[in-house]
């Protein structure tokens, strides 16, 4: 993502935050007024929920502002992760507000107070439902457009608010016309809905901070770009580090014929790294020279590959090389290991060594490095 695109993205995000602040303050003020006048706990709970949405929008606005700070000596990769932190703060606030509203609603259930419902109340709640649906659509479209976790959280919250206000409206109508005291129960339902939403959002927004696996879009771009470079025999250890929306740093290993001119290989690798800058990523390539003209080594490698596939067709290897020792040959290679095969390393090693020792090429010892399949 270019600098211009990043700036544009932040402007869009801040604009969405300002819209959220204004809209939620207006909706919350109207609901709080009718909630107090009608003595409805569910409407008051809904109003407080909207006030927290305004705070969430403020946090989102601050998050976009802070994420624009340039890299410095203490943060050489920039500050784009502030957006993830602001999303987490929003989620935690939502959870605690729901918890407090649940306690208040339980008190209303224990000591019910009659609700004074009116046409004005119905109009304000109906207007609030339409307003929240409009904000949901706006934030959803904007979140998708700029790939923002903060706006995605705000969109989900707006959708929840529309559902909550609908429940509150129905509960107040029912209580008004039937005299059945359900306002406290409706408030509790609203509170539980908020608590569950908060928990789910906390879990979702913790993932990128903890190092959640990136989506496959950037990986697909890198792999497709590799196909444009025929000198690359194979690749492995592709690691993508996310430092915030549009900011990533990657590393990868290229297997290239050892007989090629190192200066030529270096220039090709530099060209690849420069081209990846157009996709918003700083990529570093590690050059692995491989032997391609040894019939003996190729025979050993093909035999081990066949043995691994026979054990599990997901297995493969890279960086295959050998050293002749006194009375035996030591071979070295790496195997990307699926998570469900962790603990089977000894079996796989024995499978590979038995295959090599059946080649009638002397005795072999396999030194295997087991990598994570996530990076291969």
Image: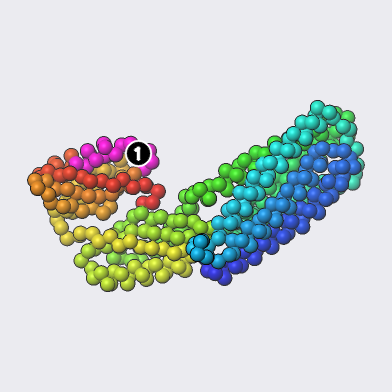
Residue drawn at point x = 76 percent, y = 48 percent: 50
Left or right? Give the position of 246 relative to 100: left
Q: Quadrant of residue 340?
A: top left
Pinpoint residue 16: horizontal percent, then vertical percent: 69, 59
Residue 142 seen from this side: no
- State the residue lying farthest toward the top: 110
Where does the magenta region start and end? 338-353
Residues 14 and 278: in front is: 14
Does dot 1 land on a helix, a strand or a loop?
loop
Left or right? Give the position of 165 relative to 262: right
Q: Is residue 79 above or below residue 329?
A: below
Q: Mark 1 packing: few (<14 Cα in 10 Å), some, or many (20+)?
A: few
Residue 89 seen from this side: yes
* Main secondary structure found in the magenta portion: helix
Pinpoint residue 169: horizontal percent, then vertical percent: 81, 40
- State the residue lying farthest toward the front: 73
Pinpoint residue 101: horizontal percent, then vertical percent: 75, 38
Residue drawn at point x = 11 percent, y = 46 percent: 328
Magenta stretch: includes residue 339: yes
Please name the colour scheme applied to the rendered image.
rainbow
Q: Is residue 265 above or below residue 129?
A: below
Residue tagged 1: 342
Q: How many marks?
A: 1
Left or right? Give the position of 164 relative to 120: left
Residue drawn at point x = 67 percent, y = 62 percent: 14
Pinpoint residue 211: horizontal percent, then vertical percent: 49, 50
Magenta stretch: includes residue 187: no
Residue drawn at point x = 77 percent, y = 57 percent: 22
């Amino acid at each position: 993502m270019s600098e211009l695109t990043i700036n544009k993205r932040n402007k869009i995000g801040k604009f969405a935050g300002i819209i959220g602040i204004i809209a939620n303050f207006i909706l919350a003020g109207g609901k709080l007024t009718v909630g107090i006048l009608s003595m409805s706990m569910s409407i008051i709970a809904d109003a407080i929920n909207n006030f927290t949405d305004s705070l969430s929008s403020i946090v989102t606005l601050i998050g976009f502002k802070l994420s624009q700070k340039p890299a410095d000596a203490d943060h050489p990769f920039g500050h784009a992760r502030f957006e993830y932190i602001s999303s987490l703060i929003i989620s935690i606030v939502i959870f605690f507000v729901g918890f407090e509203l649940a306690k208040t609603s339980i008190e209303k259930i224990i000591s019910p107070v009659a609700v004074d419902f009116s046409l004005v109340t119905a109009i304000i709640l109906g207007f609030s439902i339409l307003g929240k649906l409009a904000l949901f659509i706006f934030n959803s479209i904007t979140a998708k457009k700029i790939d923002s976790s903060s706006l995605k959280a705000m969109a989900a919250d707006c959708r929840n608010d529309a559902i909550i206000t609908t429940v509150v409206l129905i509960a107040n109508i029912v209580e008004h016309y039937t005299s059945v005291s359900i306002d406290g129960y409706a408030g509790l339902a609203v509170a539980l809905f908020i608590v569950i939403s908060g928990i789910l959002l906390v879990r979702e927004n913790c993932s990128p901070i903890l190092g959640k696996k990136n989506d496959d879009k950037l990986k697909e771009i890198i792999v497709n770009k590799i196909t444009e470079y025929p000198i690359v025999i194979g690749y492995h250890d592709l690691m993508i580090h996310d430092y915030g929306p549009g900011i990533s740093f990657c590393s990868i290993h290229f297997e290239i014929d050892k007989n090629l001119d190192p200066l030529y290989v270096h220039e090709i690798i530099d060209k690849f790294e420069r081209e990846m800058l157009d996709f918003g990523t700083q990529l570093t390539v590690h050059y692995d020279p491989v032997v391609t003209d040894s019939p003996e080594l190729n025979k050993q490698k093909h035999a081990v590959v066949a043995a691994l596939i026979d054990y599990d067709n997901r297995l493969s290897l890279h960086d295959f090389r050998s050293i002749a020792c006194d009375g035996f040959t030591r071979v070295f290679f790496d195997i990307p290991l699926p998570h469900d095969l962790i603990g089977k390393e000894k079996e796989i090693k024995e499978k590979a060594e038995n295959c090599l020792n059946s080649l009638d090429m002397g005795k072999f010892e396999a030194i295997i490095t087991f990598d994570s399949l996530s990076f291969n």
